[in-house]
Amino acid sequence: MGKGGRSSIGARPPGLSAVTLAVLLVVLTVPSVARAAACCMSASAIGVGRLRIWEQFAVGLSLSAETGFGHWDADGDWTRWGDDYSEQVYSGRLWGLVGFGRRTSVWVQAPVLLNHRSTGALSQTGGGFGDLNLGARYEVLSVGEIRELPAIALTAGIILPTGRATDSATTTLGVDATGRGATALTGGLSLELTRLPLFVRFDTAATVPLPTGLRGDGPRERLGTEVEIALIGGAEVHRGVVLSLRAHALWQRPAHRDGKAVARSKAREVGLTLAGSVELTPHWTVQASLAQTLLGDRLGANRTGRLVATLGLRYGGF
Amino acid sequence: MTARSLAGLLMSVLLAAMVVGCDNGDDETTTAKQLALALSWDPAPPTTGQNRLTITVTHADGSPAPGATLTVDPQMPAMGHGSSETPVITEVDPGVYEAFPVTFQMPGEWTLSVTATHGTMSGSASASLNVGGAMGGM
């Protein structure tokens, strides 16, 4: 992948499958007509994703609309919201991904959020710039590099508290809150196995918020560490058209205040995401997804049950 | 390690993580250290947005405790934040105090801590609140 992708392909070890070789041949000779292939099917998933094997950079914009249905308490009891309350979040995310060498890429993602909440006679809308997300990806083993083994990638990143924390919100319903209010470190592992026209990917990631002071001189607080696992299966159902289904589970450990665990602050959720991408040209890809947390008792805790619809446009440069 | 044992280990980890995520807490507790606190809400139960909290403070013998100093602190534990507004507390009758607005800016589980001090006497109350759950069900 990345700028060094092409020169490194020829140095790959023997034993590559005919399919992989064919893909590589396409990449080497006619990248302008390259289509989704073993190396690339999951690359254009919603969000930053990763570079296709022939790309040097990619940029994208995704627009999301999210609506909530209810919430879980700390015991996992599900409560559906009534007609007296509604909550929507609209967001735009501009992102960029640049390759450095054969295996390394870095990304940045900048979100803008618009929140709307309505309860009884009170209805408020607010928003602003969200938390900036920076990260790097290192491919220990690229897709197809050794056919018998899954691709292995490591990610590391940082989330900067450039948004406004809920604790600093000034509106009654907190609609001007756009961030978590604390720097967080992220790390992840991704395994991906491809057998045309199918791929399967396992992702695991951790987000570790750093301690921060509440309202400046308030107690030191550290939000709970989040661990997420996700299993994604997908297929190229038509030339340049990839559909995938993602199942995820997320656990959040207790928050800590002045070094002590905060009671009833654990959280968890499970969800499904149906995603699709259509390659319009070798450079441009349209992406869409529908993500739904699974609703019901014990399927979550201290979380909102929600549906998120996302539409994205991706440009890959090579 | 075989694939079967690896799958078993993974399932065990997942189940353990889900069990660890379930813990119980108190709905409401009142700790009397010479002063006793009783809380009542308007609306009841409290909802997303602004709520009025009436706090009745009494001595151990049940007589009202006028002139006490109170604090009201709503927190959303999992989200790590408090309320978007600071309630103003006024004494509306001897030993009866009103806090407004007690604001829960979003639905979910909140905790409320109330303290009262009167000279050398003190008391506290805490409650776990499922805010925005008035309609219930799936």
Image (spheres, helix red, strand yellow):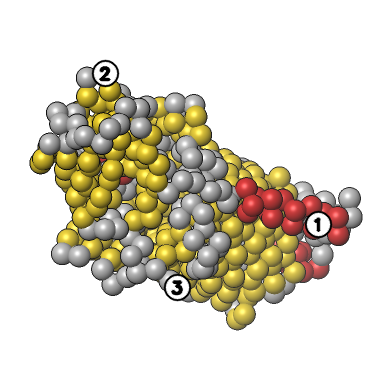
The earlier-in-sequence mark between 2 and 1 is 1
Residue closer to the observer: B3 or B86: B86
Q: Position of residue B118 (x, y in %)?
A: 22, 24
Q: Position of residue A28 (x, y in %)?
A: 66, 60
The dot on residue A11 is: none
Q: Say which residue label 2 marks.
A: B120
**Callout 1 amino acid:** Gly
Mark 3: secondary structure: loop
Q: Residue furthest front?
A: B61
Q: Say which residue label 3 marks.
A: B138
Mark 1: secondary structure: helix
* Residue B95 in sight from this viewpoint: yes
Q: Is residue B87 above or below residue A59?
A: above
Residue under mark 3: which chain is it in?
Answer: B
**Callout 2 amino acid:** Thr
Alpha carbons under labels 2 and 1: distance apart: 59 Å
Residue closer to the observer: A118 or B59: B59
* Residue A55 in sight from this viewpoint: no
Would you say A191 lies left or right of A221 here? Answer: right
The residue at 63%/54% (across/down) is B18
Q: Say which residue label 1 marks.
A: B8
Which of discs 2 and 1 lies nearer the camera? The answer is 2
Mark 2: secondary structure: loop
How many residues crowd around disc 2 within 10 Å: few (fewer than 14), some, or many (20 or more)? Answer: few
**Callout 3 amino acid:** Met
Residue under mark 1: which chain is it in?
Answer: B
How many residues crowd around disc 1 within 10 Å: few (fewer than 14), some, or many (20 or more)? Answer: few
The earlier-in-sequence mark between 2 and 3 is 2
The residue at 43%/71% (across/down) is B137
Q: Position of residue B111 (x, y in %)?
A: 37, 44
